[in-house]
Amino acid sequence: MDNIQTTLAKDKLLALFAREEEAITAFSTPLVNRIRQHALSRFRQNGFPATSKESWRFTDLTPLLNTEFTFDFSNQSRSMDIEKIFTCDVYDLDTFSITLLNGWFVYKNAPLTKLDNGTIIGSLAKAMELYPELVDQYFGKTAKTEEHEMAALNGAFVQDGLFIHVPDGVCMEKPVQLINIVDAQQPVFLQPRHLIIAGKNACLTLVHCDHSLTHNVSFTNTVAEIFAEENAVIDHYKIQNKGRNSALVTNTYFHQKRSSKVTSNIITLNGGFTKNIVDVTLAEPDTISEHYGLYLADSNQHVDNQLYIDHLAQNCHSNQLFKGILDDEAKAVFSGKVMVRPQAQKTRAYQNNRNILLTDDAKVNTQPHLEIYADDVKCSHGATVGQLDPEAMFYLRSRGLCERTARQMMMIAFASEVVQKISIEPLRDRIHDLVEKRLKGELSICDQCVLHCNSKEPTTFNIDLSKL
Amino acid sequence: MLSIKNLSAAINGKTILKGLNLEVKEGEVHAIMGPNGSGKSTLASVIAGRETFEVTEGEVTYLGSNLLDMPAETRAREGIFMGFQYPVEIPGVSIANFMRTAINEKRKYLGLEPMTGAEFLKLMEEKKKMVDIQSKLTNRSVNEGFSGGEKKKNEIFQMALLEPKLSILDETDSGLDIDALKVVANGINLLRRKDNATVVITHYQRLLDFIIPDFVHVLFDGRIIRSGGKELAIELEEKGYDWVKKEK
């Protein structure tokens, strides 16, 4: 701890926990509550991450903690009709859709569904009640509470979130869409927790949308633990389109067994403050882990992507590609670390971070990093910060495109390298459309995922193309 | 159509064109030949409006207007097309989207209604057949991963879509095998009309076996040192550039 404000915030949270312990622990299994106590003591010891820590050097939480937040430990909204506040208008993407409102699972029928194919989808709190052995088998196994302060904080306060278990050999054809909505009249502090398991030879596509319906201050700190068992295939998409006054910290842990494949794609369209921590454990041989990201930020938005990929076994392949366009005084941070352990021979690990800055005040701190202890590996890393290719600009103009149109086309093209990695076509088209709108300054925070909301006034954000 | 008088141009302070004169009229095909470094590509770049070149002297008139006052995009909309020696790869931009945007920006400039998607598709199919371009190529990103031949064919395809009045083709034959060369030359010949003009810039006479020029010019050290009919190209091929250099 290095300053008074974060210490105060920590003390407040600890006092709050002591006061509300009964409510907080009420829905959890005994094992989860034991893990909670451990996380709580970590949080007591380490507090909030300080900027003296390398991975938080350019991302300061302090100003965000200076708010009187409210907490909802007893779920006021659990069985309300979500359509009253949020109307889904699903396009040609057929999804199994799930909503969390202010961190709590919202249901119209059942809080937890077991599909015909054996897949269980629903509320984590309910899963702890109905399938405690299943939850206990995985919960807390891959989240690093020792190392990650925000994961420790989440672990201390965990109550509800999304639970998915796809049994061995089952392919979940329909993508699961999780919509995380923040809608509150007062500043809220939310800590949803997700536990996602794809069994042996199972497959799952998860589309995770973070959305805010109000322009009020909110702080969301999520932890997702995602397990890919032997030969499982997981596609994970995160679309972040939040209001300017929102802070979002996501801690996503992937644990991969033999021959499993994970593809993750984080698209940050908007947000006041966003920090995504992605931590990948390649525990067994022959895994593939691909991580893509796109961030578009303007005004004084702050986006930080921190990746850590741990190659523990041989013949695993990991790839990172993160791209960003920054306008005004926006700031971005990228730190990607690949660890190749001595036994992880035949590792292939690549990472690349590319940025376009539109103004002199926009800023990016990028740190690609490789740590290699095996000798038979292929690794590369790279980072670029720059402007658009003048040769390509001239080529477009020589065909009659004005400078503005040419720039717009180039920026969309720059972004689309990441968008093209999305394997579901309707989702790819939709996100392409969102990115295009965002770069043309036509996107409102209500345009999100495959959904539209009809309740609040749209707010528009601009990347000013003339500044390039 | 195009009148170049005493044109001098420099890049990074180095003078490349040193008082060049050229007249191009409607319906004509001109070939500009010359050894490496003589200023052929610079001439094409200056006409297309590349800002990295600085015009230090002379004037260029195109259809009665001062061409040097226009930015590159205006020149294109007024009907000038440059076929690039090294077409740029632009990942993420599809040829179809690029060309539709280009056509509609031009139409807007000319005060015409934008072309609808259906109209554009029809036009694209027509021109594809004309220049013998594979249909899947147009769905791909501009020039990305294209072979040398595909890149040059794509230039001719763009030219066919944009229907320019004046085309400057910069070393369009370089890096092509004989089959690709025939396709490219055939495309250029098909696009030839009484009311447009073409300037072919080439190092070798080979292309001129397929495209018969009305005039051949030899460019050397920033100036046109000799002009003649198509027989000049054959003479050059036989005697080499040293011949004209000596005669100069």
Image: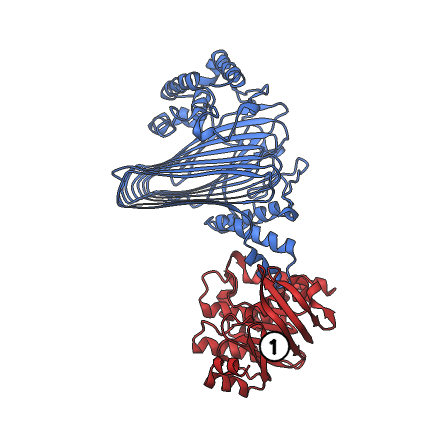
Mark 1 neighbour density, 10 Å: few (under 14) some (14–19) many (20 or more): many
Q: Which chain is red?
A: B
Residue A222 is left or right of residue B54, and the answer is: left
Question: x, y (%) of residue A382?
Answer: 42, 45
Judging from the image, mark 1 belongs to the subunit labelled: B
| Figure colour of chain A | blue
Q: Which residue is mark 1?
A: B198
Question: x, y (%) of residue A18?
Answer: 47, 12
Between A91 and A344, the one lying in front of the other is A344
Compared with B83, B208 (above or below) is: below
Question: x, y (%) of residue A201?
Answer: 33, 43
Compared with A400, A24 (above or below) is: above
Compared with B87, A271 (above or below) is: above
Question: x, y (%) of residue A434?
Answer: 58, 46
Compared with B92, A96 (above or below) is: above
**Location of residue A168 (image quadrant):** top left
